[in-house]
């Protein structure tokens, strides 16, 4: 696979949109020093090439659910048609917020929000029952804390040495939303770049009111930001989904993990979970040799704490949204 080399102008635009994908063209022009015409042209080109896949709103998930679970599925007797139907079902499931196709010990990984233990059981049953006889085995883990969600460092190919101050901890949940807030969030989750005027038209509301409501949602830490979904494969990276079995998960070990992942620009996501593995991460590497180097680095860095690991090649992400529509309408 040939790597698409990002030109300096494209990098400037992408980095600004990763920081805030709702930035209007006029502000992007001031921040990058590029004309509006160039920015419009390059954004359209990046979209057509599939490098920019989507514009998403980062929502504080812990306010909308009691937890997030990961389900990994190993399939048997599968063909392209059956796999397509299964992926389509998962993409449309009202609780699923992310899913990816894998190559390795498992064929699919997905995450979903749940409101209580009964809801957790129902969602697992719905998905596993649909897969039916094509499901050989599955593995469940529950999220505890999110340690890293970062795409800028990969584009820069150098670390951003700051902890995420808005790290999400799952457990108790509570959110204060009225009907208008829910509808605004629903539109922003579908497309973070939707203009305020277009939201106002769709909801038959005043544009100034929409602007004020979005500002309040940000101030309440319901909305944590706006960013891009990038197809890292188009940029020549190989993606891996990795689980680590780490012992001695005390504060010293947690700090060590967080310090390491912040220094590594190729780790895009990391979370602490319960289950077979207590740390999961997504890694992007330039090639197999690069992955081997990073794997050896992880093994050496955590030689006294690491008791096991497993990795899969991540072939393609099929869905990414922070909070499915269903959870915006829950009476909490």
Image: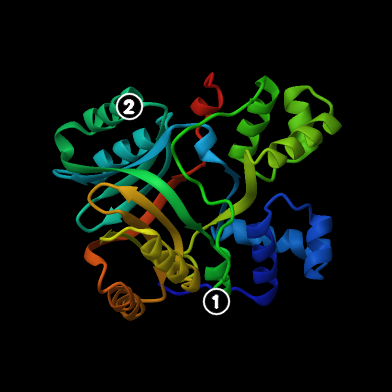
Q: Is residue 274 left or right of residue 235?
A: left
Picture quarter containing residue 40? bottom right
Residue in the foreground of this view, choosing between 258 and 105: 258
Q: Disc 2 designates what residue?
A: 117
x 62%, y 53%: residue: 227
Look at 79% across and 55% down and name the residue there: 25
Residue 328 image position (x, y, % from top left): 56, 27
Up/down of 154 relative to 174, above or below: below
Q: Quadrant of residue 152?
A: bottom right
As rendered, which of 270 and 45 lies closer to the eye?
A: 270
x then y, percent, for residue 35: 83, 66
Q: CA distance from mark 2 to mark 1?
A: 41 Å
Quarter placement of the N terminus: bottom left
Q: Between residues 50 and 259, which one lies in front from this camera angle?
A: 259
Q: Secondary structure at mark 1?
A: loop
The x and y percentages for residue 41 are 73, 61
Q: Which residue is mark 1?
A: 158
Question: Considering only order in the chain, which callout, 1 or 2, is on the residue closer to the N terminus?
Answer: 2
Residue 268 drawn above or below residue 65: below
Residue 128 picture quarter: top left
Are dots 2 and 1 in contact, CB under 8 Å?
no
Q: Extreme front residue here?
A: 251
The structure residue drawn at horizontal position 14% and vertical position 34%, both measured from the top left corner, is 133
């Amino acid at each position: 696979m040939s790597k698409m080399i990002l030109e300096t102008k494209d990098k400037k635009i992408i980095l600004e949109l990763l920081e805030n994908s709702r930035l209007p063209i006029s502000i992007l022009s001031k921040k990058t020093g590029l004309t509006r015409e160039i920015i419009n042209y390059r954004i359209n080109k990046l979209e057509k090439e599939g490098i920019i896949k989507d514009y998403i709103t980062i929502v504080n998930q812990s306010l909308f659910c009691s937890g997030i679970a990961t389900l990994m599925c190993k399939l048997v007797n599968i063909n392209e048609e059956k796999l397509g139907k299964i992926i389509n079902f998962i993409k449309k499931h009202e609780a699923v917020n992310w899913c990816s196709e894998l190559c390795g010990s498992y064929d699919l990984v997905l995450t979903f929000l749940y409101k209580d233990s009964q809801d957790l059981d129902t969602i697992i049953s719905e998905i596993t029952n649909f897969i039916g006889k094509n499901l050989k085995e599955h593995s469940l883990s529950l999220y505890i804390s999110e340690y890293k969600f970062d795409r800028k460092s990969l584009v820069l190919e150098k670390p951003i040495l700051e902890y995420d101050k808005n790290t999400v901890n799952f457990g108790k949940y509570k959110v204060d939303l009225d009907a208008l807030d829910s509808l605004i969030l629903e539109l922003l989750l579908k497309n973070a770049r939707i203009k305020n005027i277009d939201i106002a038209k769709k909801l038959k509301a005043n544009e100034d009111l929409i602007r004020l409501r979005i500002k309040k949602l940000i101030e309440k830490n319901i909305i944590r930001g706006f960013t891009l979904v990038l197809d890292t494969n188009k940029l020549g990276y190989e993606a891996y989904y990795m689980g680590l079995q780490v012992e001695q998960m005390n504060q010293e070990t947690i700090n060590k993990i967080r310090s390491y992942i912040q220094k590594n620009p190729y780790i895009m996501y990391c979370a602490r979970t319960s289950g077979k593995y207590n740390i999961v991460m997504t890694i992007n590497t330039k090639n197999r040799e690069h992955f081997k180097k990073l794997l050896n680095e992880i093994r050496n860095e955590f030689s006294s704490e690491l008791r096991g690991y497993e990795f899969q090649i991540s072939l393609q992400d099929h869905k990414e949204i922070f909070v499915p529509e269903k959870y915006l309408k829950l009476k909490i």
